[in-house]
Amino acid sequence: MKNSDRILAVLLVILLARAADAQTTETAPPEKKLPMPGEVFRVEGRTAFVIPPDKKSDGATPWVWYAPTLTGLPGTEERWMFERFTKAGIAIAGIDVGESFGSPDGRKLFSAFHRELTEKRGFSPKPVLLGRSRGGLMTLGWAVENADKVGGFAGVYPVCNITSYPGVPKASGAYHLKPEELTAQLAEHNPIDRLAALAKAKVPLFAIHGDIDKVVPLEANSGEVRKRYQALGGEMQLIVPAGQGHNMWSGFFQCQELVDFVIANAKSQ
């Protein structure tokens, strides 16, 4: 065998091995630790999960769409409210779209996830979206473009304003734009500037947000959303715990008003 033939043979073996590794990685079940028993699977190559309800619904399964589904999230702190959702017959689901900051790439993955659950798994076409911190950008960013597919939005100190967090310079990479380009196009992407469709569709909003939050300031996020949403004719309930910031205070995650809001709006669809 000529040297050139040997080299080609070696290259072929390497390419086949890499292809096999890639296929194995793609088809192997994804790993994710959930705060409650559930199914972990892939949608568009991304890790997704469903925590089923304790009892099946007669019709489409009502559900809560949680974000961000990053490593370690949802966490054990969500277990209290998740248990109440499942006991009420409501599933919890989410998809890891990475640090997308509400970008078109993340919104596209959200749409694929919605199709997976509603068209293939019998879930309600109108989930209640639940955004924790930067999960607010992900959920609201999708919701303002899909108001007809949203039963409600609830947030735990949710980010609603790109300029507030993470800031345009940090977010611009996820948008494949330079900071000055994203600034020029901000009104096309920033959820806080795009609330009209949700208000027109009469989608109810809820948030619990501390009054001394320095990471995601109340005034620039949930407070400003409520102000703008009410001006548009929409309804938003806002709970402001005094003396609380962007922290793991149990009251954020064991909020009966939030649970009641989610259950009422998830089951009314």
Image (spheres, rainbow, N blue to C red):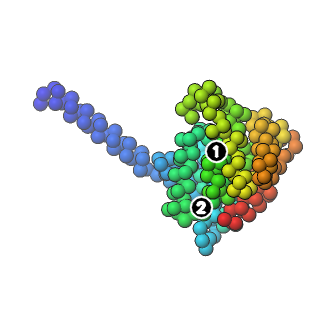
Q: Amino acid at mark 1?
A: Gly
Where is residue 83 drawn, in percent x and y?
Answer: 69, 60
Give me the residue at 74% from left, 63% from top: 264
Where is residue 128 drawn, in percent x and y?
Answer: 67, 57
Where is residue 178 drawn, in percent x and y?
Answer: 58, 26
Q: Amino acid at mark 2?
A: Pro
| Pointer 2 local density, CA inside 10 Å: few below 14, some 14–19, many at least 20 | some
Q: How far apart are the alpha carbons under marks 2 and 1? A: 18 Å
Between residues 105 and 242, which one lies in front from this camera angle? 105
Q: Which residue is mark 1?
A: 141
Q: Is residue 184 left or right of residue 19?
A: right
Between residues 247 and 265, which one lies in front from this camera angle? 265
- Please say if 181 is above or below 97: above
Residue 232 visible in this rendered orientation of the protein: yes
How many marks do you count on the picture? 2
Residue 139 visible in this rendered orientation of the protein: no
Q: Secondary structure at mark 1?
A: helix
Q: Is residue 222 left or right of residue 162?
A: right
Q: Residue furthest bottom?
A: 58
- Please say if 132 is above or below 88: above
Q: Which residue is mark 2?
A: 125
Give me the residue at 34% from left, 39% from top: 18
Where is residue 101 drawn, in percent x and y?
Answer: 62, 38
